[in-house]
Amino acid sequence: MQENSIGRGVIILAISSIILKLLSALYMPVLSHILTDDGIAIYTVGYDVFIFIFALTSLGIQPAITKLVSEERTIGLDKDVFNVLFISKKFLLIYGGIASVVFAILAKPLSILFNSNDSIKVFVFLSPAILLASILAAYRGFFQGYNDMITLSISNIIEQLFNVIFSLFFAFQLVNISISWGSTGGTIGTTLGAIGAITYIKYILNKKYQSKLISINTSEDKYKRKSHNNKILKRLFISAVPFILIAAIQNISAIIDVFTVRTFIETDINIRTATLKYYTTIINVPLVIITSLGIGIFPKIIKGYLEKNKKELVIQTSYCYKLTYIITIPSVCGLMILGKDIFKLVFNRDFGYEILLFGAVALIFMALSTIQNIVLQGMNKFKFIIKLGFISLIIKTLINIIFIRINNINVIGAVIGSIVSLAIITACNHISLQEYFDIKIPIINQSKIPLIASIIMSIVLLILRYILIAGFISDNYTRINICIVTFGLIVIGGIIYFLSLLLLGGISKYELDTISPVIYRRLPLKLQNRIVKTI
């Protein structure tokens, strides 16, 4: 029963993550239409720095709170669990408050550092969101540790909906004053989204756990309770440090890209910055599916590791790699072939799409390293992740500086830096996992069938795209026409890729059932016979 409950929780969280990423992806094209490239560049400078501070104050501490809540649920009483919530909330109120004030004070120096004086107001208006996000992290860490994924997921969706609606509304209204005010308006929803999520999550907390909340304040031994609370706070510090460092490493890459682009490119820096933002928006959509799959398979890998079941480790880790390739390789091919059309459709741009021709390759390494890091974190290999992360950041920064200076490369240099650094991380992670597991894990072989199926799909897409573009819309390359062609090609490409996988024996019944058992039952008998019945 408990395993089923955890499984349902993972599925709910994964679905909500995909919904959030889709909302984010739909939000950026509308915002770019309102603000134009200049406004998006101003917005990006402020928002990327905010995300880094957010990682230090919220993303890095939330998993530590989750860990403490889970431990207290296992070994302690309910009131100890709720003490973790209150102690962490008080700590984050102070920590987030200080970070919020410092962020606002440094608004002008940061805008000068990033060569974007118009971003001052963006920094100032985002500063309250740091405090609110910190408080929200305490609640979310509690609910995740309590395995209440429904409340957690709904709060995430409420936050993102408020963010999208109010950010677009205020951007649309304030852009009439100036571009910089419009960019600032595009951040107001971040604060209001956090307020909406906190309001909902506090309502659920009081509704579900009111009696338990009251019991905390009726403790008979105040000295003993204070001593226990101090121990919880100490454990929170110890647990949070590695998570904070990992979150910082994972989120500073975007700041390095923006900083190097705005420092070493002399012309059209706002256009280049906006192009980089559009690229990351597109590339992150398939990545969230990979992350969700990693969360789903994670418990089985850890179970195999703890039980020293090498066979299970080989099966599950190989399965992770295979699913990663099944999703990322066709995505890479599709982004390369349809990159120009996607840029036109999503951002109404006839230029800048070249970044997808190179940057799509990074998706494979992003996905593989994400899966690997999920496994390594579960095995408490934090020192290894942090050391490798720091080294990769140094390498990325150097590559950025070298290539961004070259006129014919400029912003694509940031993508090259990402590809090289992520490839190094992927290779080192794979070697380390094999050493930790003391087994050989196939990583290249798993890509063969998805690669062949993707090549078949790509050939068909190239031919169909040429016929449709050259024959029907070459002289009328509008957003509406491209929308029809692009979505048609995506559907056709998906069908061809899926059928190719089936005919090549590249997908098993287990993998289909992971998505939905209905798919297998609806397939013709001939195709069912082509499907491998085991992993």
Image (cartoon, rainbow, N blue to C red):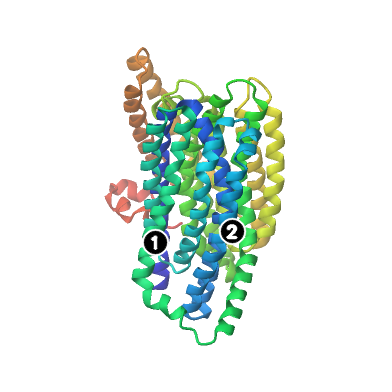
Alpha-carbon span between mark 2 and mark 1: 21 Å
Q: Quadrant of residue 504?
A: top left
Report crowding for label 1: few under 14, some 14 to 19, many 20 or more residues within 10 A (C-alpha): many
Residue behind mark 2: 95
Amino acid marked by disc 1:
Ile
Q: Quadrant of residue 211?
A: bottom left
What residue do we see at 61% from left, 75% from top? Answer: 230
Where disc 1 sits, the SS reads helix
Residue behind mark 1: 201
Residue 43 numbered mark, or none? none
Residue 407 is situated, as x and y percent measured from the top left of the image, at 65, 20
> Which residue is nearer to you in this view: 142 or 354?
142
Residue 381 is situated, as x and y percent measured from the top left of the image, at 65, 61
Where disc 2 sits, the SS reads helix
Residue 43 is situated, as x and y percent measured from the top left of the image, at 51, 35
> Which residue is nearer to you in this view: 203 or 296?
203
